[in-house]
Image (tube, rainbow, N blue to C red):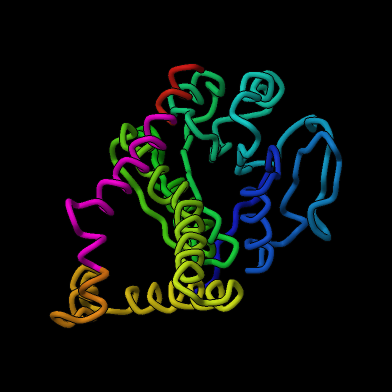
Amino acid sequence: MTQAWPAHLFMVGCGNMAGQMLARWLACGLDPARATVLRPSGRAVADGVQVVTDYPASLPAQAMVMLGMKPYQLDDVAVSLAPLCTADTRIVSILAGTPVADLRQRFPAVRDVIRAMPNLPVALGQGVTGLYADRDVSPSARSAVDAIIKPLGAAEWIEDEGQFNALTALSGCGPAFLFRFIDAFSRAGEAIGLSRDQAARMALATVQGSANLAAQADESPATLADRVASPGGMTREGLNILDADNRLLNLLSDTLAAARDRGEEIARAR
């Protein structure tokens, strides 16, 4: 099946996340001539992709605009960008803590406004992108966004925008939490006698292999854990520590809640 790309992709900002997305799209066949990046520094992003330091006189017809700058820059961006947007412009925003209503207020001519929250594995085509669109968004816009997200990995739509910060806490922030876990797992291996380098290699390979196995298995991760743990064995003894008083579950619940609540604080401060 042929990959469907936007008529033109206009990116406002190209930092870490947006840059990873663009790199993946180009690797999957996006024509660089169909992408323009606005960044004040003027630094190049990829061969063939036009970089501009100011807004053009107009946007190409049926352009998809991706907002990838810092959320606090939205008001300044809207002053210059909104006059260029028409009814056939589509806006995809990866701005944290910025509801669709805020975007619609600043871009009144645009019908199709979609929130997206990717995570870093999009660079490998193994990411998760959370998506939300209100009832005013056309089915064709949903399909177009599905198509451009497909090369990045999984697309997860939610019906209630109130869940967006929870989604962001789990998948958007999740890679950082897992990186921290891998580091702690490695350091724990070192603490019980392995060398630092060996513990680091083993921890990373164990997490990677186990995640791949869980993704391919028919059973839930909870069932897989119990299958590995023989009664009275080493694994069961370790699981007893993690499971005691739901300490691991409570730790992760507190972690995600803190991230979610911060997202809501950011939204209220706008």
Q: Residue at x 41, y 45 (%)?
A: 131
Residue 256 lies in the magenta stretch: yes
Foreground pick, 150 / 73: 73
Q: Main secondary structure of the magenta part?
A: helix
Q: Position of residue 235 (x, y in %)?
A: 26, 77
Foreground pick, 248 / 136: 248
140 relative to 54, above or below:
below
Foreground pick, 204 / 156: 204
Q: Residue at x 54, y 24 (%)?
A: 109
Residue 107 placement: quadrant: top right
Q: Position of residue 84 (x, y in %)?
A: 68, 27
Q: Residue at x 15, y 80 (%)?
A: 232
Residue 125 lies in the magenta stretch: no
Please count the marks in the image: 0
Q: Residue at x 33, y 37 (%)?
A: 257
Q: Position of residue 8 (x, y in %)?
A: 67, 49
Q: Position of residue 7 (x, y in %)?
A: 64, 51
Foreground pick, 84 / 264: 264
77 relative to 66, above or below:
above
Give the residue furthest to the left: 231
Report the magenta residues as a range.
239-262
